[in-house]
Image: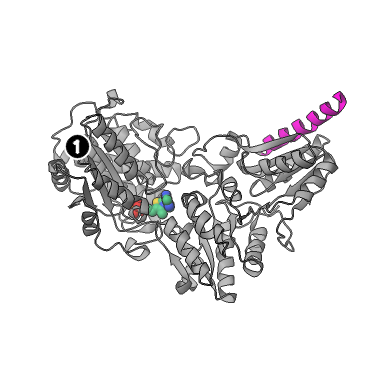
Amino acid sequence: MEKSMPDKDFKGMDRETLEKIAKKARSLIIKMVYSAKSGHPGGSLSIIDVLTYLYFNEMNVDPSDQNLSSRDRFIMSKGHASPALYSILALRGYFPSELLMDFRKINSKLEGHVHRGVPGVETSTGSLGQGLGIGVGMALAAKMDHNPYRVYVVLGDGEIEEGNVWESLMAGSKYGLNNLVAILDKNGVQLDGFTRDIMPMGNVAEKVKAFGWEVREFNGHDFDDIKSAFDFARSVKDRPVFLIANTVKGKGVSYMENNYKYHGSPPANDEEYERALREIEGI
Amino acid sequence: MRPAESLRETYGKKLVEIGHRKKDVVVLDADLSSSTKTSEFGKIFPDRFFNMGISEQSMVTAAAGLALAGKQAFVSTFAVFLMRTYEQIRQSVCYNNIDVKFVVTHAGITVGEDGATHQIVEDVGIMSGLPNMKVIVPADSIETASVIDYLVDKTKTPYYVRLTREKFPVVNDDSYKFKEGQNTVLRDGSDLTIFCNGSMVGFSLQAAEELKKQAIDTAVVNVSSIKPLDRSGIISYAKKTGHVVTAEEHSIYNGLGSRVSEVLSEEYPVPVVRVGMRDTFGKSGKSWELFDYFHMGIKDIVSAGIKSFREVNKYETIS
Ligand SMILES: Cc1ncc(C[n+]2csc(CCOP(=O)(O)OP(=O)(O)O)c2C)c(N)n1
């Protein structure tokens, strides 16, 4: 079983190290959903590189002081991507990786959807469309308290079909929340199929810009590009930032890539399972 | 009891059949059609199927518009996600009193591993509180099919039909026909009545077998029509047996247990022991594990039966 990362300042971590961590997290994701015989690998694998960067190179968080009021806040608004968040939290040292294998089991805190009872988790999610609003609230509280923390929210590109998301975009803009960063996991696939077929969203960047946010697109699987996107977000001083991560659903496991069937299904059998782990190892 | 297809599979097939015979039927879903099985209808009638994306409020209001323009609209998603449109349902559907049928799936704790966020056990209460809304909780695939026929052929007002994910055993005869506001007596008895619905009907029948071994002759009554409620059917069995248990895959607050207690306290008070979710959220686990974890399994129905039976006897000897 993988060792938890030692607790230290990870800032300035190089690309190779981040890639190694992401690889570990990817295999943990596969192991978790296979052990649970259920769960959501596709949207976990698409966002794991961004999460790796956030937890190891961007956010001010400290597993040994989890209630520090100035910690940056992270919200996994697409709460079905729990395998991604749980595995990164374990690797970052919030709890032992061994616990991941109890995911979705009756004796475990690792609920099927992101659960606040898990160390490091700021809010429970699982019903789509609510996380950005929670982020708005946290960012407003930071302003009220003159607290310097930043708030990061990950959204799915199917999820943004929820009206609630656009209501929260309005509020974020109205209050000039420059401490709020939304990250869109634009993998192009949702539950029933391709996003372009289920609900074509047109030019999301232009839409969000029109709602008063600063927008930047980047490659969600390239750590240099991820870094420049988050550095850019920090440089914006007058409004909230919406980062669009261009990603591949199921990234790293060929038969899962761009395949909506693996939105909410684990590897079907031992053969698929072994193959997934082999392919991840070979990335 | 023979195993069956899941109620949502029955629903999917039934929609296709109805699509052929009723041209005004339209179906809406919110990116869960592969799970609710409305995708079956969508494949054959793409012009009458609307996948509205992950936008439940938009789906419900569009369904209201379709109904106001003369269509019969079937609206499906997971039960839990329909709840965010409560107020749209209230204003645009129920207040207008129009032909929108909410047939939701994955209700209750039997969604299992997905966990607390998805395990809605409040929906029957929420929906029953709405004027003009009628609420049905079918027990098996035979009943599900019959309910859908009934809705299509006989009704033009809002209904909430609650389906689950898992396969449950068939409890009704093939000849069964759903009748609104009418209970079905699945097993007669003289000592105790279990009023139940949905997935708990099969469990209750098994519990009745166990109770018989303890010399408690138990009736099992399926109360699939929660609203309107078969008041006289409930009262007559309370009179006949004097001891009552309710069993539901739902909170004991505002569901079947509450409705039965209301009727009996008004008309024929007897002690009622309710089996169902207490005031708590669910959790991840296998569905069969969860029934035991939340004290809603067969053995819990049996102990509720024994409790009800003994308590009333005690009560009678004291008075
Ligand atoms: C309000 C709500 N409606 C429906 C669902 C069911 N659901 C879970 S995931 C999903 C698709 C999400 O697609 P996307 O946001 O693109 O996520 P990703 O592809 O990144 O996994 C749906 C419809 C839900 N969780 N919440």
> How many callouts does the rendering have?
1
Foreground pick, B239 / B267: B267
Residue B313 is inside the magenta segment: yes
**Residue B23 placed where, x, y %?**
55, 76
Image color mode: one colour
Foreground pick, B50 / A280: B50
Query: In the rendered image, is residue A131 in sight?
Result: yes
**Residue B280 placed where, x, y %?**
54, 35
**Residue A167 placed where, x, y %?**
33, 50
Q: Residue at x 45, y 45 (%)?
A: A37
Check disc 1 and report the residue beneath it: A58
Q: Residues within 10 Å of mark 1 (few under 14, many from 20)?
A: some
Q: Bounds of the magenta span? A: B298-319
Residue B217, relative to residue B73: is it above or below?
Answer: above
A111 displayed left or right of A219: right
Residue A73 is inside the magenta segment: no
Which chain is mark 1 on?
A
A266 displayed left or right of B9: left
Residue A211, relative to residue B217: is it above or below?
Answer: below
The residue tagged with tag 1: helix, strand or loop?
Answer: helix
Foreground pick, A273 / A32: A32
B255 displayed left or right of B70: right
Q: Residue at x 78, y 51 (%)?
A: B185
Give the amino acid at mark 1: Glu
Q: For ligand 1, tell me if the residue under mark 1 lies within 8 Å.
A: no
Magenta stretch: dominant SS?
helix
Which quarter of the rendered picture does the N terminus of chain A lie within? top left
Q: Residue at x 35, y 65 (%)?
A: A197
**Residue B112 placed where, x, y %?**
52, 43
Query: In the rendered image, is residue B31 in sight?
Result: no
